[in-house]
Image (cartoon, rainbow, N blue to C red):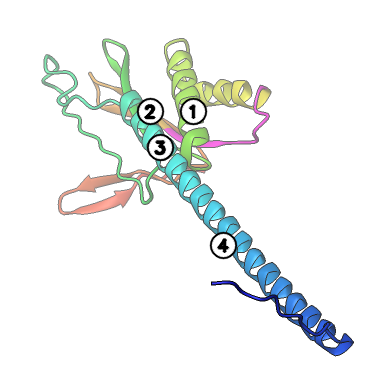
């Protein structure tokens, strides 16, 4: 049961060099493996950040859609006690959130204001600028009798505090219910279409 110690020959220079080379190769392989792990961790983190950013954008778009729908007239018929008019409107944006909006309201018992508009941009900024433009137009419409003056004063107020350089195009008409006479003004917007029988015609101004 007793073991006698065995004396080993000392390592030679060549053997030390060989061991050193093996150690160097092992260290290099470990360094490369660690670099690969770090790259994978960075890629995973970037992917997670990208997913979070996409989720944030989706939430913002949902909020913008909710803002748009909440400020537009959406109860039809809007004036059930006014049998002389029939109104319906809808907005279907090409993308998740568009800058288009519409509005209609009585400025007095005999005059109905109709608005078709489009705000530049998309998303939350467009939705907020839409709300601002819509409110300003309505406020001036209740003070002014001229469609042109309503848009002129709206333009002055929007341009006076517009650091974001956003803009809105608007077609605004005032319909006199008793006579059926419509007076309209266009601020860079597409012409509205009027249905006549089975076909539609663009309602263009005289300019």
- The mark nearer the N terminus, 3 or 4, is 4
| Quarter-of-image position of residue 21 | bottom right
Q: Residue 26, how many percent across, how many down?
A: 69, 75
Q: Which residue is mark 2?
A: 67
Look at mark 4 in the image and give the residue it sits on: 40
Separation of residues labelled 1 and 3 (CA atoms): 15 Å
Mark nearer the viewer, 3 or 2: 3
Q: CA distance from mark 4 to mark 2?
A: 40 Å
Residue at position x 37%, y 31% in the image: 68
Q: Secondary structure at mark 2?
A: helix
Which numbered dot is residue 198? Answer: none
Label 3: how many residues lie within 10 Å, few (<14), some (14-19) or many (20+)? few
Q: Nearer the viewer, residue 108 or 75?
A: 75
Instruction: Give the mark nearer the N terminus: 1 vs 3.
Output: 3
- Regarding residue 115, the answer to whether it shows in the image is no
Q: Where in the figure is residue 98, as x and y percent of width and height?
A: 41, 43
Assign a secondary structure to mark 3.
helix
What is the distance, in whole Å, between disc 3 and disc 4 at their CAs? 29 Å
Between discs 1 and 4, the one toward the N terminus: 4
Are dots 3 and 2 in contact, CB under 8 Å? Answer: no
In screen coordinates, is 153 left or right of 10?
A: left
Contact, mark 2 vs mark 1 (Cβ under 8 Å): yes
């Amino acid at each position: 049961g007793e073991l006698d110690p065995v004396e080993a020959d000392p390592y030679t220079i060549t053997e030390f060099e060989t061991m050193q080379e093996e150690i160097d190769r092992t260290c290099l392989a470990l360094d490369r493996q660690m670099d690969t792990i770090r790259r994978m961790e960075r890629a995973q983190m970037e992917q997670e950040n990208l997913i979070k950013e996409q989720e944030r954008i989706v939430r913002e778009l949902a909020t913008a859609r909710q803002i748009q729908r909440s400020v537009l007239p959406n109860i039809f018929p809007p004036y059930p006690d006014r049998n002389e008019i029939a109104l319906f409107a809808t907005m279907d944006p090409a993308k998740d959130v568009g800058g288009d909006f519409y509005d209609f309201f009585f400025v007095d018992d005999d005059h109905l204001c109709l608005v078709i508009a489009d705000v530049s941009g998309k998303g939350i900024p467009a939705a907020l600028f839409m709300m601002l433009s819509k409110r300003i137009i309505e406020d001036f419409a209740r003070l002014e009798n001229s469609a042109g003056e309503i848009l002129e004063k709206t333009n002055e107020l929007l341009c006076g505090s517009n650091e974001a350089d956003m803009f809105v195009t608007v077609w605004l008409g005032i319909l006199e219910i008793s006579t059926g006479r419509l007076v309209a003004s266009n601020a860079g917007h597409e012409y509205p279409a009027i249905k006549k029988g089975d076909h539609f015609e663009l309602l263009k101004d005289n300019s």
